[in-house]
Amino acid sequence: MKVIYADLLNELKSRNIRLSHQRLKVLEYLTKNYTHPTVDQIYNGLHQDVPTLSKTTVYNTLNSLVDAGLVRVINIEDNETRYDIDTDNHGHFKCEKCRKIYDFKINIDSFDAHELDHFKIFDKNIYFKGICRQCQIDSSNIQSNN
Amino acid sequence: MKVIYADLLNELKSRNIRLSHQRLKVLEYLTKNYTHPTVDQIYNGLHQDVPTLSKTTVYNTLNSLVDAGLVRVINIEDNETRYDIDTDNHGHFKCEKCRKIYDFKINIDSFDAHELDHFKIFDKNIYFKGICRQCQIDSSNIQSNN
DNA sequence: TTATTATATTGTAATCATTACAAGTTAGTA
DNA sequence: TACTAACTTGTAATGATTACAATATAATAA
Ligand SMILES: [Mn+2]
Ligand SMILES: [Mn+2]
Ligand SMILES: [Zn+2]
Ligand SMILES: [Zn+2]
């Protein structure tokens, strides 16, 4: 996966979405932080750099980018929406301990869902939940230290 | 897919979850309505029958049932949590027009996600979004009637 | 059956994420 | 440099979910 910032700008121009300072900063943040951040994380991450930034703007910007197809929404927990600059076909794993969201390669189209013949499919999502490798290592170290 | 009410009751007993009137009604609702209902739909559907029912109880009950593994949460939109009495491995399709959620068979385990080796996986989810067959038929009929 | 008590239910208030709105600002254009 | 549609901002509103404390009840044993 590789997201080229310049391509995103061209994409915005071609869709007549203005390249405001705030939008560019949000886009920049997303291309530099592949952590599937929440609105709060984006807002806090940019606040030093753009002190006048409003959280409403972060919401508005993300909604525009999602509508334009440049950003993908990740709904895993019902109380935290996350955003992904990588719109390619891939899966997500959320660790219930450290709360990190990992990407993993998976070809969703290889599935045969014949029950959905004649259904128009816009969007495919896969996510798993569990405990990541690192958290398992950490917890076994803690136990052996007792 | 087949959910046997009596089995659910045994499952609750074995976990020392009391078979209160309200819980039985919520469970009954879910086994009779395979529509992946929201809390509001469950509450409204039961309110005539159980006039004293509190929405808080519906929330509490569903949380208990989810914790016990008898019910599955479906997070597709960030503003509506839905509940599924069918906890077997299957996918969901949400129609963006009629808002219905359809089930479809899919064997998630047939994927090879070797990047997740050594990850403990508790839960696997797949959902698609688009327009269902019926809604496409409906909209083409409307157009041809012009 | 009755008494006991841990657990569940209820109504209300609190919380938190997201959106609505209106006033002020700015990107893009000529 | 001026114009204006589109954007940003702060605040208020909304809506889903949870916290809490008082009341009620399911399960158990006498
Ligand atoms: Mn991702
Ligand atoms: Mn289902
Ligand atoms: Zn982890
Ligand atoms: Zn439909």
Image (tube, coloured by chain):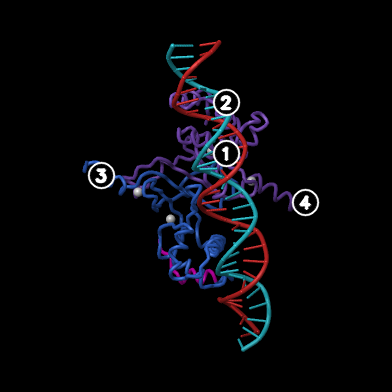
Chain colours: A blue, B purple, C red, D cyan
Q: Does the magenta portion include B103?
A: no
Label for residue A142? 3
CB under 8 Å between discs 2 and 4? no
- The number of numbered badges drawn on the structure is 4
Q: Please state the quadrant of the image where ligand 2 appears.
A: top right
Q: Along the line of sight, which residue is nearer the eye, B28 or B16?
A: B16
Label 2 sits on residue: B21
Determine the CA span between mark 1 and mark 4: 33 Å
Q: Nearer the viewer, mark 1 or mark 4?
A: 1
Q: Nearer the viewer, mark 1 or mark 3?
A: 3
CB under 8 Å between discs 1 and 3? no
Visible residue check, residue B125: yes
- The three-letter code of the residue at mark 4 reads Asn
Label 1 sits on residue: B36
Residue A145 lies in quadrant: top left
Label for residue B145? 4
In the displayed structure, does residue A140 sit left or right of residue A85?
left
Q: In terms of sequence position, does the residue under pointer 1 or pointer 4 come before the other?
A: 1
Q: In terms of sequence position, does the residue under pointer 2 or pointer 4 come before the other?
A: 2
